[in-house]
Each structure stands twice: as C-alpha cells, then as structure tokens.
C-alpha cells in the first residue's frame, strides 16, 4: 500500500537539502512542498524499515516525521483533547494556583497525565482541593490565564471548511470546554461538570466522570452518528487519558505529549504546532482557512 512521508518543522526550519536527501534515500516520488521551509511530503511504496531510527535522528534536528497511508488522509471527524492540546494550560492547575494550592495540584496533574496515577482518583483528589473557591473564579481564570494553542483556529476552521465535524472531548471542566469550543468553532464539546453550592465550588464533579473510556465512547458514538469509519477520524491529545482514542482513530496524534503517551502513540508532533495536523492530511498552507 502506498505510503506518504511528511516532514514538518517550525517555519523556516525545514531545509530543502535535508528533505531531498531523505526522499532520495527512501526512493520516494518527487517532493511536494505543503509550506516552503516548513512542511513537505513524498510518496513511497511501503513504510521503510529504518523509519523509527530516522524519526529519532530528525527529532534531534527539530523535525517531525510521519509515515501514513497515502489513501484517505483527509479526515471527517476531529476529536480533540483540550488542556495542553487546544489550549496552552491545564485548567485545573490554573484554578489551583488561584486557590493557593498550585504546587500540590500541578504535581498530581503531571503524574496523572503521564499515566502514573488513576485518572479519576487523581481528578477527584485535585478537585477536592478547590472546595470553597468562589464560582466566579472560573470565568476569571478563563479570561486571564487561558490561551489558545498556536494553529488551533486554522486546524478547526480548515477541517470544517472541508466538511469535517469537530468535537472537543475534555477530562477538564465544562466551564472551560464550552467557551473554548465556541471560540474555536467546534461543533460540540464534552467535559466534566464542576459542582457548586451557594456560589462556591463544592470540591466535586458530576458523575459519571469523563475519563479515558468516555473519550473512546465519544469516538464510537460520533462515528456511528456521522455514518463514517474509525479510519476517518483524526484524534489529538497529550495525556495518558487520550491514548484510548488515539489508538482507535485512523490518525491518532500525540501532540507535545507526555513521555508515556509518546511511547504508545504511532504519530507524534513535537516541533510543529496544531497546523501540523493539517499537513499530515495533505493540506497546503495556502489552503488553510482563517
Ligand atoms: Mg491534555
């Protein structure tokens, strides 16, 4: 089955000589530039035996490499994690920082996202530390501390312009996922509901907790509703709770992910931003929407 190799770097960091050298070494078809100095691709008859070694070598040079089947690259469903994927922060860490328990909470977050702790237990332990915070803190943190990840608006807008459906599936909270999904143009979002009483956070979330299995369930449900195949799904995330959906999706991308996630994900983006996911699908930079 024909494969396509895609090389992606930060703007200006992908040199033609390097791209051409790899194409030549792998006996690939002529190089196509998706964005000069940033992303290029070529077809080849099969996945080269040394692809893993070449990937590691290129990582050291600031370049991401992916080899994907040449057929069906443009996906019809974008299934995206939120924290540290579509936004630059972990919302719970930012909330905890406001509450003065930042260090304690972010240490748990880091271990949970690397798969060292059970996701639900870790979430409940951290949420309990937020008990008593005024509910208004949610809107304040969203306004002052949360930033969109580079390339996210172009990713969502371009896929939607080509008919794809976009769903944000977060193990974080609806108070953030709703507004972020709306800002980015996602068709829908799912997340955990932070419970509050008398204007203060109750230190708990509604059940069932949206964790790793719920992200897989969202994939299954959306694939059925849209009448598409799992091969038509592009999933992206950075945490251990994303691995289920990443391994099921036709294209599952670990984005600047935790080490344990990178170890299991087939496709990894460590140097490009979210527009790398458009290059993986063969979109040229000139054709990006918004
Ligand atoms: Mg995340």
Image (tube, helix red, strand yellow):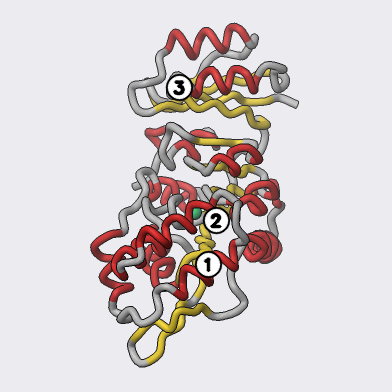
Residue underneath mark 2: 112
Marks 3/1 in contact by CB < 8 Å: the verdict is no
| Residue 35 vertical position relative to residue 177 in the rendered view, above or below | above
At label 1, counting other C-alpha atoms closer than 10 Å, the crowd grade (few under 14, some 14-19, many 20 or more) is many
Which residue is more in the foreground, 170 or 279? Answer: 170
Q: What element carries label 2?
A: helix
Give whichever of discs 2 and 1 has the lower sequence position.
Answer: 2
Residue underneath mark 3: 33
x and y percent of residue 277 in the render?
Answer: 50, 40
Measure the alpha-carbon separation of dots 2 and 1: 8 Å
42 sits to left or right of 16? right
Task: Identify the image quadrant of the N terminus.
Answer: top right
Q: What element carries label 3?
A: strand
Give whichever of discs 3 and 2 has the lower sequence position.
Answer: 3
x and y percent of residue 162 in the render?
Answer: 50, 48
Marks 2/1 in contact by CB < 8 Å: the verdict is yes
| Residue 23 vertical position relative to residue 75 in the rendered view, above or below | above
Report which quarter residue 52 is drawn in.
Answer: top right
């Amino acid at each position: 089955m024909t494969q396509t190799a895609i090389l992606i770097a930060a703007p200006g960091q992908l040199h033609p000589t390097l791209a051409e050298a790899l194409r030549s070494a792998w006996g690939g078809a002529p190089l196509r530039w998706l964005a000069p100095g940033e992303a290029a691709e070529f077809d080849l008859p099969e996945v080269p035996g040394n692809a893993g070694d070449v990937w590691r070598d290129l990582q050291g040079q600031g370049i991401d490499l992916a080899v994907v089947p040449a057929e069906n690259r443009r996906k019809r469903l974008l299934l995206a994690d939120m924290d540290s994927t579509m936004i630059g922060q972990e919302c719970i860490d930012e909330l905890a920082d406001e509450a003065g328990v930042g260090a304690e909470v972010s240490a748990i977050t880091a271990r949970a996202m690397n798969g060292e702790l059970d996701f639900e237990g870790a979430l409940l332990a951290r949420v309990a530390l937020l008990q008593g915070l005024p509910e208004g803190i949610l809107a304040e943190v969203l306004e002052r501390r949360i930033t969109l990840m580079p390339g996210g608006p172009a990713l969502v807008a371009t896929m939607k312009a080509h008919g794809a459906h976009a769903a944000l599936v977060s193990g974080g909270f609806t108070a953030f996922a709703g507004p972020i999904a709306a800002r980015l143009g996602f068709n829908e979002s799912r997340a955990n509901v932070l419970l509050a009483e008398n204007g203060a956070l109750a230190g708990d979330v509604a059940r069932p907790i949206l964790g790793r299995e719920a992200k897989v369930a969202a994939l299954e449900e959306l694939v059925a509703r849209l009448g598409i195949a799992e091969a038509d799904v592009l999933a992206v995330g950075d945490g251990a709770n994303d691995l289920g959906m990443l391994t099921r999706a036709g294209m599952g991308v670990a984005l600047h992910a935790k080490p344990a996630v990178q170890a299991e994900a087939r496709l990894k983006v460590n140097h490009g931003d979210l527009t790398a996911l458009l290059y993986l699908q063969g979109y040229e930079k000139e054709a990006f929407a918004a």
